[in-house]
Amino acid sequence: MKVHLVGDDTAKLTLLRGMLAERCSLTSELIGDAGIKGRDIDAIVVAADLRVVDNIAALKEIADRIARIPRRIFLTNHKSRLSTVQAYALGATSVLPNAPSRNQLLGKLLGAPPSPAAISVAVDDRQAASAGAASIAAMFAAVLSGAEIDIDETRRAGKRIADCVAEHGLSDWLTTVRRHHEGTYQHCLLVTGITVDFGLSLGVHSTDLERLYMAAMFHDIGKAKIPLAILDKPGRLDATERALVETHPAAGYEVLKENPSITAEVLSAVRHHHEFLDGSGYPDGLMANNIPDLTRILTISDIFSALIEYRSYKPVMAREKAYEILQGMEGKLEKPLIGAFRDVALIR
């Protein structure tokens, strides 16, 4: 495997070389001189303090070349939420602590080889996923810093995802996202692709399709206010952690409600995508007649995505099993919509 190392300190590069030399063919350069001129690079490891403006600027200069590399591992200060968000905004596919163990780093670099289906996925799918992840990361960064959210950029990223799903199909999108992204960003990208495909299968108008992908892109923006240690916790949350996670729909609504570019339908979907027809959902305990169609579509897509997404601590659930679980939620989800979702879940 050909691995390129980029760092802001020669000591960091030397340490990484010592960890990887036995298993990888290595090249390296300091961040200020980085050009990434080699071809056929399988992975890049970026070891740089993303709290330093000059490091961010240097990485933005070579962002297009970084994006062409399949595996992009950034080593950051995990105590800084903004550093992690910034890493994903710069194109990271994985983020590790700034002093990872050799096994952690090799695990990201030498994980299971891509399946033939993943290899055949068009380059524009991967670029659309990267653009989507960068847009979601930028949203989170804006929430954390109090900056204005770029709604137009989110719309462009969502449309690009919609175009890729329409052209290449949902299965290729799922393969691309699960291979190249992780955590909350993986989930949001999966939800967007699934929601778009569900809308396409229902034959919704282009205006409604835009509302669907905008709702999906923004649906978990409230999670920006929740610690990463809870969002990425391997295993079941305790009661206190679960209660904190359940604040994210209302938090997302509060972030977006004053923005005139967000439609009422999208805003409602962000707040209510965890509501159920029987009133057992949150945050408002809405009953059937008060839950709009767009929100019902997003809810089904969100649950299905959560079931089939990749997590390092559990195997990916088969789509057939995930659909069975949805079918078992009669009374909570609209039965005709679950029936209409069958082809999306199992075939498309």
Image: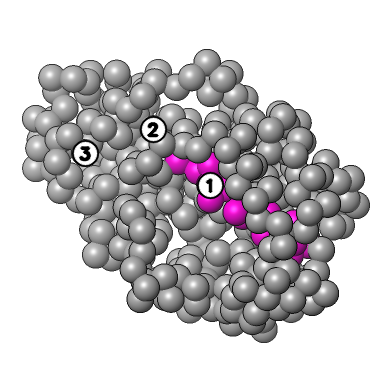
Q: In the picture shown, does residue 224 fall above or below 65?
A: below
Magenta residues, start to end:
294-310
The residue closer to the viewer here, 57 or 264, is: 264
Circle 2 residue: 71
Distance Cα–Cα, label 2 vs label 1: 24 Å
Circle 3 residue: 104
Circle 1 SS class: helix
Query: Looking at the image, is mark 3 or mark 2 nearer the viewer?
Result: 3
In the image, residue 72 lies in the stretch drawn in magenta: no
Task: Give the percent coordinates (x, y) of residue 320.
Answer: 62, 34
Q: Kindly identify the residue that appears in the image at 17 percent across and 44 percent down.
A: 100
Distance Cα–Cα, label 3 vs label 2: 14 Å
Amino acid type of the residue that numbered disc 2 sits on in the rendered structure: Arg
Looking at the image, residue 1 sits to the left or right of residue 156; the answer is left
2 or 1: tag closer to the N-terminus: 2
Q: Which mark is residue 256?
A: none
Q: In the picture shown, does residue 246 fall above or below 122?
A: below
Q: Kindly identify the residue that appears in the image at 65 percent across and 51 percent down.
A: 328
Circle 1 residue: 307
Task: Give the percent coordinates (x, y) of residue 302.
Answer: 61, 55
